[in-house]
Amino acid sequence: MRLDPCPSSPNCISSQADASDSQHYMEAIDFTGAPDATLDAIEAVLAQAAGARVTNRTQDRVDAVFTTRIFKFKDDVTFAVDADAGKVHFRSASRTGHSDLGANKKRLLALLPLIKAKL
C-alpha cells in the first residue's frame, strides 16, 4: 500500500519518504502475526492518545485525526499494514501551515514505542 507522499514543507513525516530525506523520513516498524491484530493494537493506542479520533479502518489501514489543544490545528495520521513485508508504514501530516515545529515527528516518536509494545 502506498501512502500519499509528503509535500516539500517540513510538516509531514512518513515511513515511505526517501530514506535520505531526514526531514520527512522515519523507519517503518516490523510486525509479526495477523494484520488484523496489528491494526487492533494500533487502534487501541490511538484510542488512548490525546486529541486523537479514529476516522476510518479498513482491512489494511487505520486513519486518525489529531486536533491540537490550543489552536485546534488538525493533523492526519495513517498507519498501513504491508502484510507481505511484515511492516507497518505510517504518515503524519499537518493540514495547514508550512512548519509544524516538529509536532508530527514528536507524535510518532511517542506513539511508535506504544504500538511496538502491543505487537
Image (cartoon, rainbow, N blue to C red):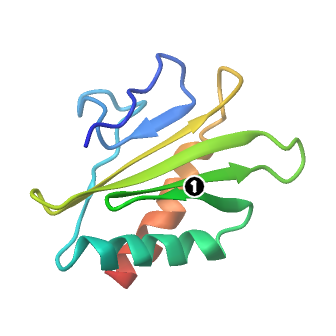
x and y percent of residue 26 in the render? 34, 45
Q: Which amino acid does label 1 sit on?
A: Arg
Residue 15's place in the image compared with 57, above or below, is above
Considering depth in this image, is 61 or 72 the residue closer to the camera?
A: 61
Considering depth in this image, is 28 or 62 the residue closer to the camera?
A: 62
x and y percent of residue 93 in the render? 55, 36
Residue at image x 50%, y 65%? Answer: 111
Q: In the current view of this chain or complex, which residue is farthest to the bottom?
A: 118
Which of the 4 quarters of the picture holds residue 102?
Answer: top right
x and y percent of residue 57 in the render? 47, 60
Q: Residues within 10 Å of mark 1 (few under 14, many from 20)?
A: some
Instruction: State left or right for residue 103 relative to residue 86.
Output: right
Q: In the current view of this chain or complex, which residue is farthest to the front?
A: 58
Instruction: State left or right for residue 80 relative to residue 64.
Output: left
Instruction: State left or right for residue 101 relative to residue 85.
Output: right
Residue at image x 65%, y 20%? Answer: 98
Q: Number of labelled discs?
A: 1
Considering depth in this image, is 111 or 86 the residue closer to the camera?
A: 86
Residue at image x 42%, y 78%? Answer: 41
Quarter in which the N terminus is drawn: top left
Quarter in which the C terminus is drawn: bottom left
Q: In the current view of this chain or complex, which residue is farthest to the left?
A: 84
Which of the 4 quarters of the picture holds residue 22?
Answer: top left
Residue 89's place in the image compared with 23, above or below, is below
Residue 36's place in the image compared with 54, above or below, is below
Considering depth in this image, is 95 or 18 the residue closer to the camera?
A: 95
Q: In the current view of this chain or complex, which residue is farthest to the top?
A: 8
Give the residue number, with chain letter if any, for mark 1. 107
Residue 30's place in the image compared with 7, above or below, is below
- Secondary structure, mark 1, is helix
